[in-house]
Every structure is written in C-alpha cells, then in structure tokens.
Image (tube, helix red, strand yellow):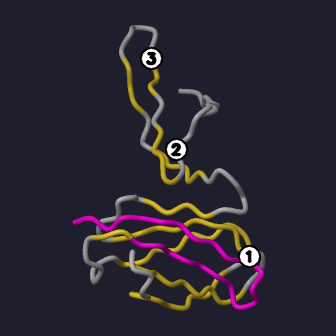
C-alpha cells in the first residue's frame, strides 16, 4: 500500500454541486471506485449559485461574503410578492446557506441575498418542485 495523489481539471463544470469519483484500475485489470467527493462551482466569485434547481426540501445558495455580518435573504414568487425571508449571520469568504422549502408551493421564485452594509447583493432564479 502506498499513497497516490490524483489531479483532475473539469473543463466544463456545472454551476452548483457536482460529485466526482475516481476509478483505480489495478494491474490485474480489476477496478475500484473511490468514495464520492463534491465540489461547489460558481462561474464567478461575484455571483451566486443555487442548487439543486429544481429544489425539493432544501435550497442551497453559495456566494462570496465581503466581510463578517448579517445576511438578509428574501424569496419572491413569480408575481413579485415576498413569500419568505430571514436573517443569518455570515462570515467573510465563501458562504453556503441552506433554506427550507417545506412551506413553499410548487412554482418559480427568485432568491435575493444582501448584506447589512449594502456591499453585497445577489439574486438567482429557481424552481420549487415536489
């Protein structure tokens, strides 16, 4: 047994959560898969990605926070009405928040995330599906 390191660069990653596994082929031709590992990809450090989309029970949002402070998120329905909102504590750097979809009916929505100082504002559309 010896340690082996691998490197893989995905040339066309999907926005959101992606799982990867490696297949190791032994000299006898048999293969073994590694445990799955995940990566959250955003096209830009300045954007926000939501996943899964469509969402079922939980919606995840990944974005960059400019500094520690409160995060204010709001969800608007397709008619522009506010249907859900909350405050959360945020930390500088890459943030990942989870939002329960249990009370949300099936439909199209927009998530808007801002910080208390107005230094950050992101929005993303998503679909709630059961």
What residue lies at 43% left-to-right and 77% top-to-bottom?
99
Q: Please identify, in this view, whether the residue under mark 2 or under mark 3 is nearer the observer.
A: 2
**Residue, x 59% and y 87% (percent of image)?**
72
Residue 113 magenta-highlighted: yes
Name of the residue lying farthest toward the front: 79
Q: Secondary structure at mark 3?
A: strand
Q: Position of residue 18 (x, y in %)?
A: 48, 46
Q: Which mark is residue 25?
A: 3
Q: Which residues are magenta?
A: 109-130
Question: What residue would you read off at disc 2?
Answer: 14
Give the residue drawn at x 45%, y 82%. 80
Residue, disc 1: 92
Q: Residue at x 77, y 75 (%)?
A: 66
The tag earlier along the polypeptide, 1 or 2, is 2
The image quadrant where one finds the C terminus is bottom left
The one of 77 and 122 positioned closer to us in this rendering = 77
């Amino acid at each position: 047994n010896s340690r082996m390191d691998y490197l893989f660069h995905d040339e066309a990653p999907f926005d959101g959560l992606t799982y990867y596994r490696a297949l190791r082929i032994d000299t006898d031709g048999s293969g073994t898969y590694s445990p799955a590992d995940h990566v959250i990809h955003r096209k830009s450090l300045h954007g926000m990605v939501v996943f899964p989309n469509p969402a079922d029970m939980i919606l995840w949002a990944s974005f960059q926070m400019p500094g520690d402070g409160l995060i204010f998120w709001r969800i608007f329905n397709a008619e522009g009405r506010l249907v859900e909102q909350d405050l959360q504590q945020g930390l500088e750097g890459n943030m990942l928040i989870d939002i329960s979809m249990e009370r949300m009916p099936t439909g199209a929505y927009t998530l808007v995330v801002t910080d208390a100082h107005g230094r950050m504002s992101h929005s993303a559309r998503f679909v709630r599906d059961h």
